[in-house]
Image (cartoon, rainbow, N blue to C red):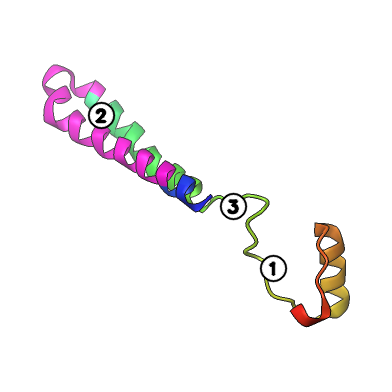
Amino acid sequence: MYARRRRGYFLLMGGCVVLFVSAWAFVRLWSVPVAVGMCVVAMVIPPIAAMVANRRGPEDRWWDEHPSGDPKSDEWWDELDGRKRHKHDR
């Protein structure tokens, strides 16, 4: 899962760099408005890449890996998640 997110991030950021560099290296010689448009598109890509890199799937447990300390709440969340936590896990 992590490798797929990382690969998506680097592909998006690589595309961003290619758009930006090509816009001002040679596209501007043909059309400045197209080069500016390419830079605008390149400007939108980094936040999208960050969202792709930080997206979590349902199997990724990152917000509640540790018990909260409230047994009733932990029991409720375990039931909601369909997960059984044993006494020795706490």
The amino acid on which the numbered mark 1 sits, given as a three-letter code, is Asp
Q: Earlier in the sequence, mark 1 or mark 2?
A: 2
Tell me which secondary structure the magenta stretch mostly adopts.
Answer: helix
Q: Circles 3 and 1: CB distance less than 8 Å?
A: no
Name the residue that disc number 2 marks.
36
- The answer to whether residue 90 of the structure is visible from this angle is no
Name the residue that disc number 3 marks.
56
Residue 15 pos. (x, y %): 31, 35
Residue at point 39%, 39% (across, down): 45
Specify whether residue 18 is painted magenta: yes
* Residue 10 figure quarter: top left
Residues 38 and 83: in front is 83
Residues 13 and 33: in front is 13
The amino acid on which the numbered mark 2 sits, given as a three-letter code, is Val
Q: Circles 2 and 3: CB distance less than 8 Å?
A: no
Q: Which mark is residue 64?
A: 1
Label 2: few (<14), some (14–19) or many (≥20) C-alpha neighbours in 10 Å: some
Q: Residue furthest top?
A: 30
